[in-house]
Amino acid sequence: MNILIINGPNLNLLGKREPHIYGTKSLEDINEELKKFGEDNGVKLDFFQSNHEGEIIDKIHQADVSYNGIIINPGAFTHYSYAIRDAIASISVPVIEVHLSNIFSREDFRHHSVISPVVKGQICGFGSFGYKLAVYALIEIIDGNGM
Ligand code: CA2
């Protein structure tokens, strides 16, 4: 089973600023931990981060033929990128949306996700553990256990 984890803009700065919101781990630390978690659960995880909307869209299109599922934290694109939403809506593989922070306990503009209506589900507020929860959920979905 192959799963792609996509992180959007500014998430390459994790661990460097705003640790009270996003934690102290760098994206490299998180990905390293997730890679091992994937191996322990029989899943090969690949990682992609970009600060550019078009690159994220290209990756989503490519992933439709090369992966069994996608986990995406679209960063601030969550709140306004109809282009990323359309890209997700155009593919067949299941997608799960993850946010490190609880977007509903923050500023009003973060309460709305234009991505949520076109994904299988959203996980937010559990820090980097949310990516592991998403891997568990995708395993259930891909194995056809009725989610
Ligand atoms: O909680 C999340 O995971 C977010 O997707 C993170 C986005 C934010 O715009 C969303 O509303 C919620 C921002 C990521 C910015 O990451 C930084 C990390 C370290 C320092 C500065 C920004």
Image (cartoon, helix red, strand yellow):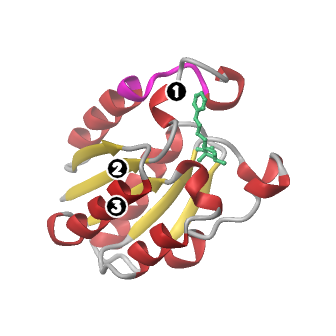
Is there any visible trace of residue 147 in the rendered image?
A: no
Residue 5's label in the rendered image is 2
**Labels 2 and 1 touching (C-beta < 8 A):** no
122 up-or-down from 43: above or below: below
Q: Which sits earlier in the primary sequence, circle 3 or circle 2?
A: 2
Ligand 1 near label 1 (Cβ, under 8 Å)? Answer: yes
Mark 3 residue type: Ile
Coordinates of residue 134 in the picture (x, y in percent):
45, 55
Mark 1 residue type: Leu
Ligand 1 near label 3 (Cβ, under 8 Å)? Answer: no
Q: Residue at x 50, y 43 (%)?
A: 9
Q: Helix, strand, or loop for circle 2?
A: strand
Residue 70's label in the rendered image is 3
Is there any visible trace of residue 125 in the rendered image?
A: yes
For the N terminus, the image quarter is bottom left
The residue identified by callout 1 is 14
Tell me which segment is drawn in magenta: 23-29
